[in-house]
Every structure is written in C-alpha cells, then in structure tokens.
Image (cartoon, coloured by chain):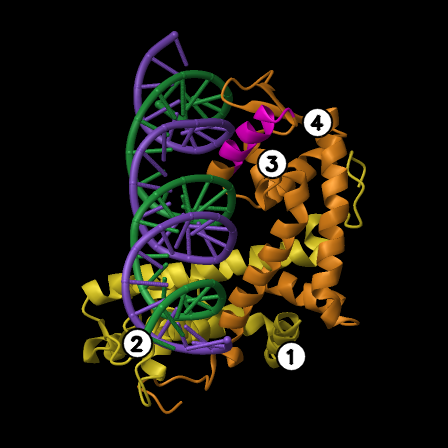
Chain colours: A yellow, B orange, C green, D purple
DNA sequence: TGCGTTTAGTATGCGCGCTTATTGAATGAA
DNA sequence: TTCATTCAATAAGCGCGCATACTAAACGCA
C-alpha cells in the first residue's frame, strides 16, 4: 500500500469482506443465468421453492414464508403477488386470521419449482466445484457466520 | 423434505448458495451500520478507498477505478458524482483522452477514507471472528471461487 | 368488555447491481 | 485521410434489500 490509504490489506483480494461481496455477486449472476429460462428471479424461485417444500403440512402466511426463506417481508409481499399473477401461487384469506394470507403453490408452481430447482442446484454445484472436497466445510463456515 | 419439492437439501441451511446469500446480506448490514456515522454507503467507501490507495502514481479514470474496485461502471459514474458533490473527489478532464475523466481524492476524501477504513476493518474483524483461526483459509476459498 | 399493544400486509422511497442504449472521442485499417 | 470499430461516460429502467410509515385485525390485560 504505497498510496494515501492506511490499510491492513495490500490489495482488495486480501480482504475477506470484499472477497465475500465479489463472490456473492458472481454467484448471483450464475443463478440469474440459470433461472432466466424459467423467467424467474432468484427471490421468486426461493419463495416458490420454500412454499412448495412446506406444502405438505399447512398453508404458510407471508410472514411465515418470509421467515423461513429469510427474505424481506416487503419483497415477499411484492414477489408473491407477481407469482400469483403468473398462476404459480394461490393467495387466499387466512381462515382464522383476518390480517393474514394463506399461501399455496399451484400444481404449475410446484412443477416449475422442481424444474428450476434442478437448474439452480446444477449451477450451485458448478459454482462451488473449485472448493471440492472442502465444500461442506465452507458451508459450515458460512453457518458459523450466521449464528453470531 | 416431505413437501412437494424434490431437493438435495432437506433445509435451506444445507445449501451453500443460500447460505452465501444470507451471510453476505448480514455482512452488508454490518458494514452499512459501521459506515453510517461517516454518511457513506458501502460503494462510496470502496471507491473512495481504492482511489485513495492508488493516489500515489497516477490519476485513475472511472473505468480504471471500476475495474480495480470490481464495481459496475454505471454505479461508479453515479457514485463518483456524489462523492464530488461532497467535496471528497475531484473529477477533471483527462489530459490526453477527451472521453475520460481523471480522478483524484481530495485531502478531505483521504482523511475520511482512512477513518472509515478503520471502522470497516473493525467491523470485518468482528464479523469474521467466528471463523478464527480459519479466517485466512476462508478467504482463500473465496479467492478460488472468483478465479473460475 | 374495553383499550392499549402487537402483528400481517402494503405504500413509498433510496441505493445497489445489472441491462440496454446513446453520445462523442479515440483507434486502426484501407 | 477517411471511415468503421472500439471505448469512456452516462441516461433510463428493472428487481433486490432495506427503512419508514400506515391500515386494519388480533391479542392481552385489567
């Protein structure tokens, strides 16, 4: 660092934070490309997939779905209306809570979620392949960062 | 996975991609909080810091700065005008390229970049502390993902 | 029962990351 | 020198992530 900035890091490549930022941007590009054939954004896919995977027991509310998917409630509200417009999600009044909305994936939604999920999982495998055989360890590290 | 989605991952916590996404969002929140006292966004800080650290040899153009900082050229253009309005950056016509802009951090810009950098590096240390003593290894992993 | 508090959903607005397109200047080849 | 190509900077627009604020319904407690 010969410039006017006093940093611990001689180059941006040494900063864990900056690297994390760049890697996630690169990953988002890959996922976006993988989902483009399905006309899905990443958030659309995540919400539909989480909804489909919870389909067995009950109808989630938007709040519950947002909690499970770790998405912003505002985004969740907006994206679910888009998914409803596509005919992939049903949004009905909640039977016992007049404020809430009971969500369910339509059959088309489930079908598309499964096909898109295969594409996303393939893109993920390709993206994280350079970590093999340490991919699991890397995922555990990410979990540690979330726990705190 | 007892629902309607056929996935390799029983829960989102097992998907490296989703974990990466969540961790980066959490990291962005920490950085945003650390930079709030300086009235900086993350991109503002990164561009100013990279510019200050390159200050020694020449005046970068916006394109060169965007390349070094790995930021989008559109963002770079817009954020640099904001930094100029704050008096932290000078944007002059390039002496030999009529299309380009010669950038330099002002003295106030350098001072603020150094103070903000200390705050960001502290926030980074705190955020990645749970990885110790494997932080370096984690950073190397991130580098591997970018290389491909 | 009544009323203050909490909660589900949504409107608005801002900065980021990206795509597409435009303008004008530099470049390179005939 | 001329003209097609490349390139720096920027305009416009979209979806994401977040903050703030509002409405209406549910909840809790006396």
Q: Quadrant of residue B138?
A: bottom right
Residue receiving disc 4 = B58
Labels 2 and 1 within one chain: yes
Q: x%, y% of residue A52?
A: 32, 80
Location of residue A10 with respect to D8 vertically, above or below: below
Residue receiving disc 2 = A97
Label 3 resides on the chain identified as: B
Instruction: Please tell me which residue is depicted at 78% across the width and 35% down the height of the picture.
Output: A3
Q: Secondary structure at mark 3?
A: helix
Q: Secondary structure at mark 4?
A: loop
Q: Secondary structure at mark 1?
A: helix
Q: Is residue A21 left or right of residue A40?
A: right
Location of residue B32 with respect to B82 vertically, above or below: below
Labels 2 and 4 within one chain: no
Labels 3 and 4 within one chain: yes
Q: Start and end of the magenta stretch?
A: B76-87
Q: Quadrant of the N terminus of chain A?
A: top right
Q: x%, y% of residue A148?
A: 67, 71
Q: Is residue A117 left or right of residue B97?
A: left
Q: Quadrant of residue C12?
A: top left
Location of residue C27 with respect to A77 vertically, above or below: above
Residue receiving disc 1 = A137
């Amino acid at each position: 660092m010969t410039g006017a900035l006093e940093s611990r890091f001689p180059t941006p490549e040494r900063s864990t934070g900056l690297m994390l930022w760049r890697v996630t941007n690169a990953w988002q590009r890959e996922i976006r490309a993988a989902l483009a054939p399905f006309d899905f954004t990443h958030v659309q896919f995540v919400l539909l997939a989480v909804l489909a995977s919870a389909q067995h027991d009950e109808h989630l509310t938007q709040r519950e779905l947002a909690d499970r998917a770790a998405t912003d409630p505002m985004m969740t509200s907006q994206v679910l209306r888009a998914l409803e417009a596509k005919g992939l999600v049903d949004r009905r009044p909640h039977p016992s809570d007049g404020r809430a909305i009971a969500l369910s994936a339509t059959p088309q939604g489930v079908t598309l979620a499964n096909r898109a999920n295969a594409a996303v999982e393939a893109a993920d495998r390709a993206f994280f392949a350079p970590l093999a055989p340490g991919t699991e360890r890397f995922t555990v590290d990410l979990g540690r960062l979330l726990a705190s």
